[in-house]
Image: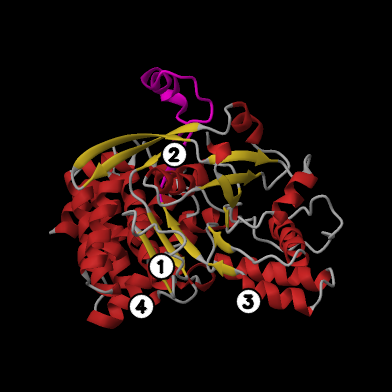
Amino acid sequence: MSMQRKETVIQFGEGGFLRGFVDYFFQKLKEKELFDGSVVVVQPIEKGMIGELNKQNCEYNLFLRGIDKGEVVDEHTHIDVISRCINPYTEYEAYEKLAENPDFRFIVSNTTEAGIEFVSDNKLEDKPAKSFPGKLTQLLYRRFLLGLKGFIILSCELIDHNGEELKKCCMKYADLWNLGEEFKAWMETENDFCSTLVDRIVTGFPREEHEALCKRIGEQDNMMDTAEIFHLWVIQGDHEDELPLVKAGYNVIWTDNVDPYKKRKVRILNGAHTSMVLGAHLYGLETVGECLKDEKVSALLKKCIFEEIIPTIGDTQDNRNFGEAVLERFANPFIRHLLLSIALNSVSKFKARVLPTILEYKEKYGSYPQGLTFSLAALIAFYRTDAANDGEEIMAFMKEASVADILKKEEYWGQDLSPMLDVVQKWYDCIEAEGMEKAYGEVLA
């Protein structure tokens, strides 16, 4: 029973992601006898799922499925590393008491992108403060008053420099609540707010397969979780001595700078998604899996990744390995990823994920990359259809404006893209005149 092990981790968040990612690592470290602690889960918002977790003695089953080096993997793990769950809205004293236990060393969080925010009407006396950084500051201040050492804080929210942003919010609460310079100095020196990059598609509760999976394991589990086999956790800092994730064989990188890894993920993984899906939808496909099975679409995807994106950001073996892993992830037979769900807000996604590669490629090689500029033409053609899903003004403009006017729209792209007009217009005319199938043939020729 996990209750017998000392509690060493406070986890803000009980959703599918943390249970399919961080808790999996703690579970595996425990099984390899590299970690003798357990996790206490804190529900970060008023409505949550810890009631369900508590009903199951904080235990659940995780299925990791996908393709790894060409082999189909279907791994089942029974997770029992969580000792208890606390709802600070109904058990504030139990929450506050966590500060008193010197064994606690790690804090992990995933409170969604909106979770790391400073809300100025939160008070120290609130039980609890409403925002996640407010709750954390309450806990840290109590810890400080007791003269105990601080924490290694691992933020997993999907925002840039998540650890630094969380620390900034906590410092603002220290000022707002007049907690004193000594406390701020303790926060600074006794705690390590680590920014991290997390990468794993967690598909969550397997609604359609739930009954079959319960039969497979011989138990009813209403907190079951599913995810892909791929994982990457890049952590700014180095606490391998206390959290031996690399020693345990996991794809974890301790580094002094997360940014290059973030760039690689955004350009290769997200850039490949965004450049592929709109043309593939116009071609008549529905899912990412179908794209990988289609000769033309997968050939263009590989061209974009290995001939355009990777040469631009750095043709290293690491980047090529990451590109190969992306293809396996996209081909995962256990995930049905709809193209139209990825297509949401494609203009802003294209600006962040694909456009920087196009512009850097031009600077580096003197010409525009054919595959990625083709994907911009496909984006324009897609926005002419009723399938587009974006802000109303964007959709209205994109539906009627000429290719030239669209490329001039600096508020969409951050700059005037008129120099790209010839190549984008050529591909757009090809798509409109000959249809998507022939257009794929042309760009691949």
Q: Is residue 387 visible?
A: no
Q: What residue type is labelled 1?
A: Trp
Horizontal placement of 197 versus 142: left or right?
A: left
Quarter of the rendering containing residue 334: top left
User: Residue 189, labelled with which disc?
Assistant: 3
Q: Is residue 114 inside the magenta stretch?
A: no
Q: Is residue 205 inside the magenta stretch?
A: yes
Dot 3, how many residues are within 10 Å of its Cα: few (below 14), some (14-19), or many (20+)? few
Are the two marked residues, 2 and 3, in contact with CB atoms closer than 8 angstroms?
Answer: no
Question: How far separated are the C-alphas under marks 3 and 4?
Answer: 50 Å
Q: Mark 2 or 4 closer to N-term?
A: 2
Horizontal placement of 294 versus 237: left or right?
A: left
Residue matched to label 2:
203
Horizontal placement of 124 versus 134: left or right?
A: right
Magenta-tinted stretch: 200-225
Q: What residue type is labelled 4?
A: Pro
Horizontal placement of 239 versus 93: left or right?
A: left
Residue matched to label 4:
419
Residue matched to label 1:
254
Question: How far separated are the C-alphas under marks 1 and 4?
Answer: 41 Å
Q: Which amino acid does label 3 sit on?
A: Thr
Q: Mark 1 or 4 closer to N-term?
A: 1
Q: Where is residue 347 in the image (x, y as percent from the top left)?
A: 47, 59
